[in-house]
Image (cartoon, grey):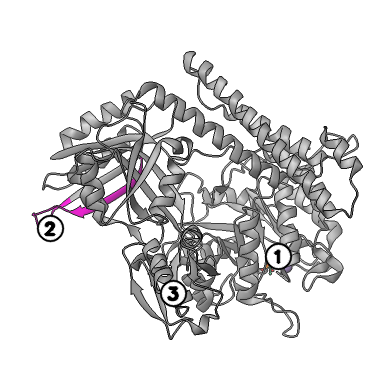
Amino acid sequence: MDITDITDDLEKNDLEKIRQQINLIDGQILKALGSRRDLSNQIIQTKSEQQMPLRDSRREEELLSRLIKSGRDLGLDAHFVTRVFHEIIDDSVRSQQLFLLKSINPAEEGTKRVGFQGIEGAFSHLAAQKFFAKEIEQIVFVGHPTFAEVVQAVEQSAIDYAFLPIENTTAGSINEVYDLLSEARLAIIGEEVFRVEHCLLALEEVPLASLRKVFSHPQALAQCMKFLSQLETCQREYFADTAMAVRKVKEDQDPTQAAIASEDAGRRYGLTVLRRDIADQRDNFTRFLVAARHPIKVDLRIPAKTSLVITTPDEPRALLNALNVLGKHDINLTKLESRPKPRTPFQYIFYLDFVGNIADENVQAALEELSGTTSFLKILGSYPMEARGKTAPSIQSMVPPKKEAQSSEGPGGAAAEPKKAKAKVSYKLASRDTKADNTVITVRGVKIGGPEFTVMAGPCAVESKEQIFACARQVKECGGRILRGGCFKPRTSPYSFQGLGFAGLELLAEAGREYDLPIVTEVLSPGDVEAVAKVADILQIGARNMQNFSLLREAGKVNRPVLLKRGMMSTLDEFLNAAEHILGQGNQQVILCERGIRTFETVTRNTLDLGAIPILKHLTHLPIVVDPSHAAGQRDLVVPLALAAHAVGPHGMIVEIHPDPEKALSDGPQALRFPDFVGLMREIYKK
Ligand code: PEP
Ligand code: MN
């Protein structure tokens, strides 16, 4: 039966019937995925025989753009389609890589034994299952009491692989594993990055206040400190792994006990989830290494990493000389770790990870040269990189096309940079004389200051979950890269809406996560900088605060990009000096924003100073964006001003949008309605 027939015949209120149809469709989706994988496996044979590259990002981009278009015709949003097909493409890439690996590393058939520290349900076990997912039928997982026993079991051929955590994004390096690897006779053959999601688990649904004991691994307890501080009357007890803590709660049958572990461990041992996602930092990842007795060969078409252990001679510049060798060969070092050298107080061994493959001639040349500058060098192995990289659909494909034919006329590209005699200036770090190359700022993969025109959009103020989610969805659907939303609002009148504060910031962050958009929000007071920087990806300093020097200084101390808005009565020299206050504290990530200045003209809210853009590009290396919304103050001027601004060559734009501007709690008159925003994006990206 065809899906469309089913849908036509549907009796709307027959829930059971509808569910059956859904089951049928799900089955068809699965079948289609299976057929797709078979075809992808056929392709890899050809690619392998003909030495073709494994990935073709042009084809992937075209494929995504085409699917987004077809999806849109079916009422599916671009973000959803992109997410689904990223998973599907990633699965194909993983299968194809595995095929290539197996063809050059033939292994005996049969069961493989993988050792990890802990018992079943521990995070190491879950991550190992993910790593070996494609060959899971041939794998037996074996828990061990300690890391050392895992390593020893592989060395003594009792098992085939050691699966070991090496670093965590909250807790840092796992030193014991580094120390074991430097002495072990093992080679690294793979890595896995696993998202650690902590849950609070108990025997049954009980109020948090009734809990008396919480069990977990010391690291897991440390990662949930903020949550645990609410459970004041609870004692904490340490266990060798999180799953053991879960098992203990089950064994004791005491409803006043709880464990912190994965939801999977809870299910395995029959506990109930009381709270999900309780870690202080949401982005909590652990990187694991897979080690075996023999190294593997990695096909040059598979992106690979190499890990080394070195010691350097006790002489000036020794480490620098070693690192310079990598620099000379254009090698991207991804990790450098130092550990005390055993039995040699105050001497160190260094662990290096870099992008590259020992089968590559350039890497071989680098390693040969490196051995001349080090006193010891051990290659731990080359292995496929976990980050396989996702091809982004083009922004053009994200912007919904216009239905009717339209003219292709539009504003031109960047204007030529003006030649201008240099005046003596009082800022240094912001000046092009100090740094000739443009500063390009990267926030969660989004670049500001490079060749791409980056659009940030969102409401003036975060008002509710519905409002900010609607805006985020719209921004994403149109190819916007960053979500804006004020939570601490600098209002002229103290009686106006002042923003939702930290509660609003949480909503903004949630929307950013849902739609995979970095977030920018204004910080008003120096005392809030640290707390806002923990959640926001970019801190905004508003026009009214451009010369709030203590705020600038605080923003200069955190490692977060700062969107600095030009004060409404400020000259460009004052603007750049304000940036200098931030840069001077160590934070080199400043984005300048022209948002209009106050002139004698009162028809517009401010006068957008377009000339400032090419002048700033000449004077400074910092990225420059334009805010047409606060300059215009009225909706009908925002699009023309934005297009005019685009023509003078800024690196991006920040614009206010609102699902229902009449009801907006601040700056409603200048907020673009969603269709206006779509039109603007079409015009900018010529769609
Ligand atoms: C804002 O962006 O919400 C804002 C208050 O802007 P400005 O500081 O430019 O007035
Ligand atoms: Mn505003």
Q: Is 444 one of the magenta-colored residues?
A: no
Q: Of callouts 1 and 2, which one flags the residue occurring earlier in the amino acid sequence? A: 2
Query: Which picture quadrant has residue 601?
Result: bottom right
Which image quadrant: the N terminus? top right
Q: Which residue type carries mark 1?
A: Ile
Secondary element type, mark 3? loop
Can you tell me which quadrant of the image ligand 2 is in? bottom right
**Is residue 171 placed above or below 31 in the rendered structure?**
below
Q: Which residue type carries mark 2?
A: Phe
**Left or right relative to 269: residue 390:** right
Residue 225, given in percent of the width and then of the height, sits at 43, 74
The residues bearing labels 3 and 1 have C-alpha atoms spaced at a distance of 68 Å
**What residue sits right under mark 2 in the picture?**
346
Secondary element type, mark 1? loop
CB contact under 8 Å: marks 3 and 1: no
Q: Which residues are magenta?
A: 332-348
Residue 30, given in percent of the width and then of the height, sits at 66, 37
Q: Is 343 one of the magenta-colored residues?
A: yes
Query: Which callout, 2 or 3, points to the residue nearer the camera?
Result: 3
Q: Which residue type carries mark 3?
A: Gln
Q: Of callouts 3 and 1, which one flags the residue occurring earlier in the amino acid sequence? A: 3
Asked whether residue 434 appears in the rendered view, the answer is no
Query: Which picture quadrant has residue 35?
Result: top right
**Left or right relative to 378: residue 264:** right
**What residue sits right under mark 3 in the picture?**
253
Residue 29, given in percent of the width and then of the height, sits at 70, 37
**Is residue 489 placed above or below 107 in the rendered structure?**
below
| Residue at (80% x, 56% y) in the render | 638
| Residue at (71% x, 42% y) in the render | 26
